[in-house]
Amino acid sequence: MRKCDCLQPGCPYCDPLNSIKDINQQLIIMLNINSMLDRRKDFLEGDINILIKYDKEIITNLQKSFKELTFEYIVETLTELGQAPSVLYDDNGNFAVNGTGFQNVAYGNETEDMEMTFFVEKKYWKPTMREALHYYLFDEDDE
């Protein structure tokens, strides 16, 4: 997102070179996290303490780079770690990202009809999906 529309060369907000730099930074962060995810897979059948260490390191990287990473990338990375973040909408313009709920057990690789139930505390509801994800990733356990 640009903060202005002047399109003047050297403008710190809309110069195309800044966009390229931001994309490169995002790419570097994603490559680093993807590398950690790949290394983590080597320990899925092994020592749980190593998995926990990788999970904490990956979540720390997601938190540090929250502003640079896309919503989709963060959610998909959390699912790689075994979390199940669900994006919910309350019909009043608010979103929540919640990892606790009940659902039928999914069998096989095919999609199927499924019933899901969530309880969402008031503090989880945020005006944007991004803010809801931020709360899930940073603040959920602090309150």
Image (cartoon, helix red, strand yellow):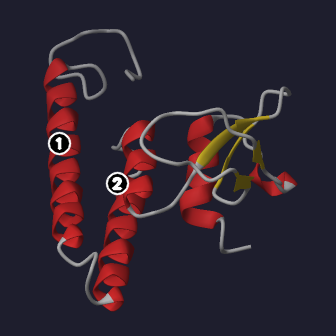
Please name the amino acid that badge 1 sits on: Leu
User: Which image quarter holds the N terminus?
Assistant: top left
- Residue sitting nearer the eye, 107 or 82: 107
Q: Residue 52 at x, y = what percent?
A: 37, 82
Sooner in the amino-acid sequence: mark 1 or mark 2? 1
Which of the two residues, 17 or 118, is positioned nearer the viewer here?
A: 118
Q: Left or right of 21: which side holds 59?
A: right
Spatial distance from mark 1 to mark 2, Cα to Cα?
11 Å
Across and down, in percent, residue 139 comes to 63, 65
Which residue is labeled 2 in the image? Answer: 65
Q: Mark 2 Cα within 10 Å, few/some/many (few <14, many 20+)?
A: some
Number of callouts in the render?
2
Residue holding disc 1: 27
Please name the residue shown 41% across and 23% down the image: 3
At 82% from the left edge and 33% from the top edge, which residue is drawn? 90
Q: Is residue 92 left or right of residue 41?
A: right
Q: Name the kind of residue labelled 2 in the image.
A: Ser
